[in-house]
Amino acid sequence: MSFRIEGYVIVSADGMLADAGHVMPDSLKFDGDKLFFEQALDRAALIVHGRNSHEQQPNSPKRKRLILTRKIKALSVDPEMPNATLWNPKQASFEEACAFADVASGMVAIIGGPAVFEMFMGRYDTFWLSEAPHVRLPGGEGCFVGVPQRSPHEVLASHGLKPGTPYLLDAAHEVTVTPWRRT
C-alpha cells in the first residue's frame, strides 16, 4: 500500500472548525475555499472522516470513504452510502480498512473532526490549513485536540509539520490556505 496522507480543514481566527453546536456555520464557508476543497477531494482515492463530518458536494456520493464509528465491531459497507466503509479503528487497522474499501494507493484526504485528525498526526505528508481571519466562533469546536489551549499552528508544528507559502483563496475575506509539510 502506498498512500499520500493529506489533511483539510478551514478554521476561524480562534482555531474553531464548528460553532458551539458542532455545526460548521455559514460564516466559515467561502467560495474559494469550497472550490479548493472540492478539487482536492475529486483527486482523492479515499476520504476519511467521522460520523459528523461530510463535505455535502455534488460528487460526494461517488467518492470512496471511510467513516469512523465506534458503533460497529467489524468493517462494513454503509447501508446508506455504497461507496462508504464504516470503520471502528479499535477493531481494524487503517490498512485493513483501506483493503476492505479496495483502495491500495493514492491520496487519502482526512477531513475531520478533531479526533480523526489526531489519529493521523504522525502520518500527514501535507496538512492544508485554511484560515478565515475575520471569523470568530467563541465556545466553538477546536479543529484539533488541544485547541484552543494551543493554536492550530502550534499543534501542527508539534507533530513535525512546517508551514509553506500560503495561498489566497478569498481576497475579500483574506481567507488563505497554508500547506504544512513533513520535513
Image (cartoon, grey):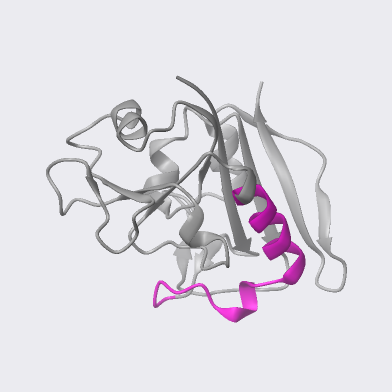
Is 37 situated left or right of 95 in this image?
right
Is 52 situated left or right of 122 in this image?
left
Secondary structure mainly formed by the magenta segment: helix
Q: Relative to 131, is 4 above or below?
A: above
Question: Which residue is depicted at the point 65% across and 72% down?
Answer: 29
State yes or no: residue 163 in magenta: no
Question: Which residue is depicted at the point 45% across and 74% down?
Answer: 23
The stretch of residues the image draws in magenta is 20-41
Place of residue 46 in the rendered image (x, y in percent of width and height, measured from the top left): 48, 41
Q: Quadrant of residue 169?
A: bottom right
Q: Is residue 80 visible?
A: yes
State yes or no: residue 34 in magenta: yes
Question: Which residue is depicted at the point 48% across and 74% down?
Answer: 19
Place of residue 91 in the rendered image (x, y in percent of width and height, measured from the top left): 17, 35
Place of residue 49 in the rendered image (x, y in percent of width and height, measured from the top left): 41, 51
Seen from the viewer's position, the closer of residues 142 and 95 is: 95
Q: Relative to 107, is 18 above or below?
A: below
Seen from the viewer's position, the closer of residues 139 and 47 is: 47
Place of residue 75 in the rendered image (x, y in percent of width and height, measured from the top left): 21, 41
Q: Is residue 148 visible?
A: no
